[in-house]
Amino acid sequence: MPEQSTRSKIVGAAEELFYEHGLRSVSVDAIAERAGVTKRTLYYHFDSKDDLIEAYLQARDEPTIERYRSWLGADDRPMPDRILHLFSCLADYARQPNWRGCGFTRAAIELVDMPGHPAVVMAADHKKRFESWLAGAFAEAGLENPELLGQQVVTLTEGAIAQILVHRDVSYARVAGQAAALLVAAAATGHGAARHREAV
Amino acid sequence: MPEQSTRSKIVGAAEELFYEHGLRSVSVDAIAERAGVTKRTLYYHFDSKDDLIEAYLQARDEPTIERYRSWLGADDRPMPDRILHLFSCLADYARQPNWRGCGFTRAAIELVDMPGHPAVVMAADHKKRFESWLAGAFAEAGLENPELLGQQVVTLTEGAIAQILVHRDVSYARVAGQAAALLVAAAATGHGAARHREAV
DNA sequence: GTCTATAATGAGATAGAC
DNA sequence: GTCTATCTCATTATAGAC
């Protein structure tokens, strides 16, 4: 299928360049050049740059969730250990020199003044899916308040990614992982989290 | 001092526009127009747009830290309560319709492919100052491992801001605040955090 | 110190041939 | 479906008068 091949070459080029440099600083010309096609061909497959941005995020959606799924690992260890492992994998991943944080969060921030933009909507949806997946894993593990815990762990993940990106220091992943593991442990024993929530 | 007045009018316009719309999507023309001066006058006071971006962040640096200082409040209550109050104030603040997250983090993300850019350096410095201030407050309160706790609370703050921005849902501030208060409480009693760290 | 006017460049998107 | 060539517009930055 030659049509698909050209289109996916363009999406691949968009993924590389948008993720590395950001949305606004990458031109359509640059993407066409990297894909080895002319701009006219690119505009044959995509209506606009915004359309291309949407395809870029779409391509990253499921693979990103799947990566976290593999980092959490199977249900054969205590959840605090699995969470520690997830953040440890995040640290390793962020050590790659071309790591640039979360493409979804970055897109939402770059397009912060365009609330209805498809990329902004997709970013929010993606984060919600990630959070729901976490809450589901916590529920399966029999923890208290899995939804709250999902929100807290997703928030720690977001914070760790931002801090690693700003300081170029992966140790924030470990620090965030310890915090997340503590919250999870408290929800497992019934100590701490539940008691504290009542006080709020 | 008429010179200062023009310059500060320009910086004020830059603050409003850069914070609301982002760095790359705001033109120098727009800033000059908002400031009520011509572009030539702007370029008399600033060498370049990058210079203006630097001035924008410089102007926000101290006021931002001071705002968090006031949110934490005085040392007359238990630290977990003060932390809860800080995040509660963040929620109120983020409810403002023109709130757009943290200008420093957003700048670092928009300029992610320019590691040496003055604005990127300033963003990192600002976050470090915020973290140091938090660690100092935790140390004064006699908590265990104030540095680690500072890193964790700063990470929760960053994560909460990102999540609020992406979902336009301020409840993440409360959720993050509860997590932070739990970590702080564990460091106060000596339970949990210290024990867990040994296990890692 | 501030103005009007104008480079000089790069961007997104399109025309029309093959 | 892909190409060469071009349009149109916005952007950063500057020239030179007052």
Image: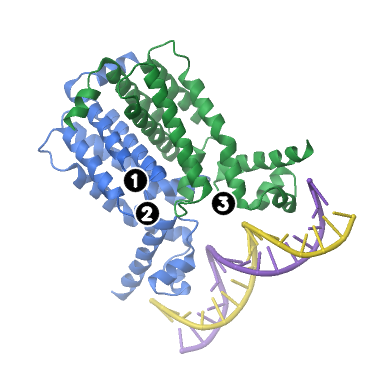
Chain colours: A blue, B green, C purple, D yellow
Question: Mark 3 to mark 2: distance in Å?
Answer: 21 Å
Q: Is the residue marked by circle 3 packed among few (<14), some (14-19), or many (20+) residues within 10 Å?
A: some
Q: Could you say whether the residue bearing mark 3 is in a helix, strand or loop?
A: loop
Q: Nearer the viewer, residue A27 or B83?
A: B83
Question: Mark 1 to mark 3: distance in Å?
Answer: 25 Å
Residue at the spot x=36%, y=64% of the render? Answer: A11
Residue at the spot x=12%, y=38% of the render? Answer: A75
Q: Which mark identifies residue B25?
A: 3
Which amino acid type is marked by label 2?
Leu
Question: Marks 2 and 1: same chain?
Answer: yes
Q: Could you say whether the residue bearing mark 1 is in a helix, strand or loop?
A: helix
Q: Which mark identifies residue A126?
A: 1
Q: Are marks 1 and 3 in contact (CB under 8 Å)?
A: no
Which amino acid type is marked by label 1?
His
Query: According to the image, label 2 marks what residue?
Result: A57
Q: Please say whether residue A76 is visible from this viewpoint.
A: yes
Question: Mark 2 to mark 1: distance in Å?
Answer: 9 Å
Horizontal placement of A67 versus B85: left or right? left
